[in-house]
Structures are given as C-alpha cells and as structure tokens.
Image: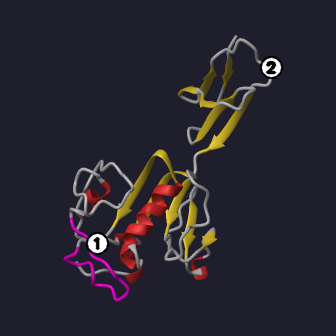
Amino acid sequence: IGIEVKNIPSEMKVYVEDKNGVRFEANRVGDNVYVKPFTSWNGVKIIYDKSMKLNLGCGENKKAGYVNVDRSPLVKPDVAHDLNVLPYPFADNSFDLIEAEHVLEHLDKVFPTMAELHRILKPRGKLVIKVPHFSRGFTHSEHTHGFDVTFPLYFNKNFTKSGFFGVEFELNILQFSWMAHFHLLSNLGTVAK
C-alpha cells in the first residue's frame, strides 16, 4: 500500500527516508505526491523540504521566497555578508536556485566566487548570472571586471585546459540586453521619450 499526500505546494519537495537513512525524492503529479510502497513501513519517514533559493547581492531588489544576501545592512538583507569573503555562510548543496544579477562585476575574484557558488548549489541546481558585457563593464566606478561571451566556457573542461577552473557548469542560455536596470528608471520620475 502506498501513500498519497495531497495539496503540497509546488516549491516544496517531499522525500522518503527508509529505516537505514536512505533518502529519495517522492513522485509528484501536480499538487499531489505519491510515495511508493515499502515491504515494511516500520521506520519510514516522509520528509518535506522546501526548495531553497538564493538572491545573491540583492541590493534593493529583495525577492519573496528567497534568501536575500547583501553586504549592506542598509537594504536589510536576510543575511548581511561581504561577498568577497569566502566561504559564504551556507552549507554545501544548500540551494536549488542561485540568482546573481549584476554582482560578479563588483567582486575581487570572480573564479573563486564561481567555485563557491558551485559548492552551495545543489546538484542539478540552476545558477542564473547577469553581468555587463565588457563594452560597458566599467561604466560604474565599482566594477572590477567586464565579461564577454567566452565567460561561461571557462566552466567547461573541454574548452581549454589552461583556463578551466575546476568546477563545471552547463550553459543553457546566453542572452544580450543593452539596458540592465530598467527597474531603476522609475526612481527618476518622468523619463523623457
């Protein structure tokens, strides 16, 4: 006999742990979760684990449902941490999703930071990075780096032996946009057309 758990929010994962501590993810169909039968239910636990999302360098753009991290206590982040200081205050494999929007260009050492993001990202997790193209990478006085289309390739061990930094990320999409901070335009009041 199996168990059906109904009305589980989509952002919440459900795991089953057997009496030996072996854990696996339960099957999901819509808002219902189905746990396959065991020969013995003695010692079996159903574990709910909410999906964890990280908004790295949140600034004023705090996101609901995320752990919002920034160095400045003025923006009242969930976690105040200088992102140049490694390691970050999170356990290995903590996050299903990490978003870093216009953060890397402000940091001292991009490749060690990428290794740190790899450490705290769960296997098969998603990392979303937005950075300025090198043609406008230094338009802000705090930018220390500009990026071009080869940046993601340094995390592919087949790209170059001398440039590979020891952590792999799979590139799913590379997109260009000329304007980076549309959300800030509203701070200016009426914008001339």
User: Residue at (33%, 48%) from the top-left corner?
Assistant: 170
Q: Residue furthest front?
A: 162
Which residue type does callout 2 highlight?
Asn
Magenta includes 41?
no
Q: Are marks 1 and 2 in contact (CB under 8 Å)?
A: no
The vertical placement of 20 against 102, above or below, is above
The way the protein has been coloured in the rendering is secondary structure
Viewer-nearest residue: 135 or 59: 135
Majority secondary structure in the magenta region:
loop
In the figure, residue 143 lies in which quadrant? bottom left
| Quadrant location, the C terminus | bottom left
Tell me the number on the disc at residue 159: none
Q: Residues within 10 Å of mark 2 (few under 14, many from 20)?
A: few
The magenta-colored residue range is 134-148
Mark 1 secondary-structure assignment: loop
Vertical position of residue 167 compared to residue 71: above or below = above
Apparent side of residue 83 relative to residue 172 in the rendered image (left or right): right
Give how far across and how far down residue 129 sits, in percent.
37, 61
Answer with left or right where residue 89 lies relative to residue 29. Answer: right
If you read the primary sequence from the N terminus, does the residue marked by circle 1 or circle 2 appear first? 2
Q: Position of residue 54 (x, y in %)?
A: 53, 59
Residue 165 shows up from this direction: yes
Q: Which residue is mark 2?
A: 42
Which amino acid lies under the numbered mark 1 shown in the image of this protein?
A: Pro
Q: CA distance from mark 1 to mark 2?
A: 55 Å
Residue plotted at (59% across, 82% down): 74
Residue 130: quarter of image: bottom left
- Residue placed at 34% from the left, 71% from the top? 182
User: Residue farthest to the bottom?
Assistant: 141
Q: Which residue has dot 1 on it?
A: 132
